Image (spheres, rainbow, N blue to C red):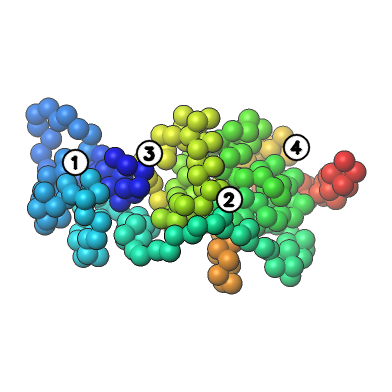
Amino acid sequence: MSDDNRLGAYLRARRELVRPDTVGLPTVGVRRVPGLRREEVALLAGVSADYYLRLEQGRDRNPSPAVLESIAQVLQLDEAGTTYLLSLVAPRVRRARRRRRAQVPPSLAQLLEVIGVPAVIEDRYLDVLASNPLARLLDPSMVVGENRIRSVFLDPAVQALHADWESVCDSLVASFRTSVGSDTDDPRFVELVGELSLASERFRKLWARHDVKALAGGSMLFDHPQVGSLRLHRQKFTLSDGSGLILGTFHAEPGSESAEKLALLGSLAPAEDERLNQR
């Protein structure tokens, strides 16, 4: 299957993850393929087996939204997954030159400095463009210039920080694929995915699943070397200026032990920033 056939690759990856019994199909006998067969997806979606085969092979790249939504139901895709599927056949403008690096508005950069919780701004490739001292003290992957997905997979210090590292990997890869969408011509994307695919077996396996995940909050458990275990709630917001930048914040439950530890970490932030400035 060619690298340019993103629709076919996504359909195949998701088809192989659906158990027959979850869609009402019998599981008796020997099945030579994981998940659903192509003809089973076609039957349940109400299209011909030959037509579905052409979709997976990239010989028909203009299916109607109704057909894709029917297939999405069979593949048990959620709203984010269905949106991503539809985006793979939407018209798009190919970019001949490297995308210009997004700029963080000065007012927003100043706001980060006075927010009382860890806060970071990243672009669609999870490159960190701005962060406040508390974020940098919480997680070294939030230092400006770092790439958060690269750090999580390749930096042992960041891996040790996340008590639920495997879950973090799952979520980060799915969010990354959603953020990039079908716009995979940018050299930054090619460079990053290529590096991670060569260096991390876990990334290769997760990337091959074609999971997507809508931008949303969640709970994260940190095992911090200075303050110990703390659970923080993560929130993500897309900036409304069309830049594609994402603001991420982390906060603890008020009155909790994690809130006390986060406050303690905050008291160390000025000294840590001074140390970094002296380098």
Task: Name which residue type carries label 2.
Answer: Leu
Q: Earlier in the sequence, mark 2 or mark 1?
A: 1
Instruction: Determine crowd level at label 2: few under 14, some 14-19, many 20+ residues with C-alpha closer than 10 A.
Output: many
C-alpha gap between disc 1 and disc 4? 48 Å
Q: Are marks 4 and 3 in contact (CB under 8 Å)?
A: no
Report the mark closest to the observer, 1 or 4.
1
> Which labelled disc corresponds to residue 126?
2
Instruction: Determine crowd level at label 3: few under 14, some 14-19, many 20+ residues with C-alpha closer than 10 A.
Output: some
For label 1, the residue is 36
Q: Earlier in the sequence, mark 4 or mark 3?
A: 3
Q: Secondary structure at mark 4?
A: loop
Task: Name which residue type carries label 4.
Answer: Gln
Which residue is depicted at the point 75% across and 37% down?
A: 226
Q: Is residue 30 visible?
A: yes
Report the mark closest to the observer, 4 or 2.
2
**Residue 240, picture quadrant:** bottom right
Q: Earlier in the sequence, mark 3 or mark 2?
A: 2
C-alpha gap between disc 3 and disc 1? 17 Å
Residue 145: horizontal and vertical position, in percent? 69, 47
Task: Name which residue type carries label 3.
Answer: Ala
Q: Earlier in the sequence, mark 1 or mark 4?
A: 1
Q: Earlier in the sequence, mark 3 or mark 1?
A: 1
Task: Name which residue type carries label 1.
Answer: Leu
Q: Earlier in the sequence, mark 4 or mark 2?
A: 2
Instruction: Determine crowd level at label 1: few under 14, some 14-19, many 20+ residues with C-alpha closer than 10 A.
Output: many
Report the mark closest to the observer, 4 or 3.
3
Q: Secondary structure at mark 2?
A: loop
For label 4, the residue is 226
The one of 166 and 147 positioned closer to us in this rendering: 147
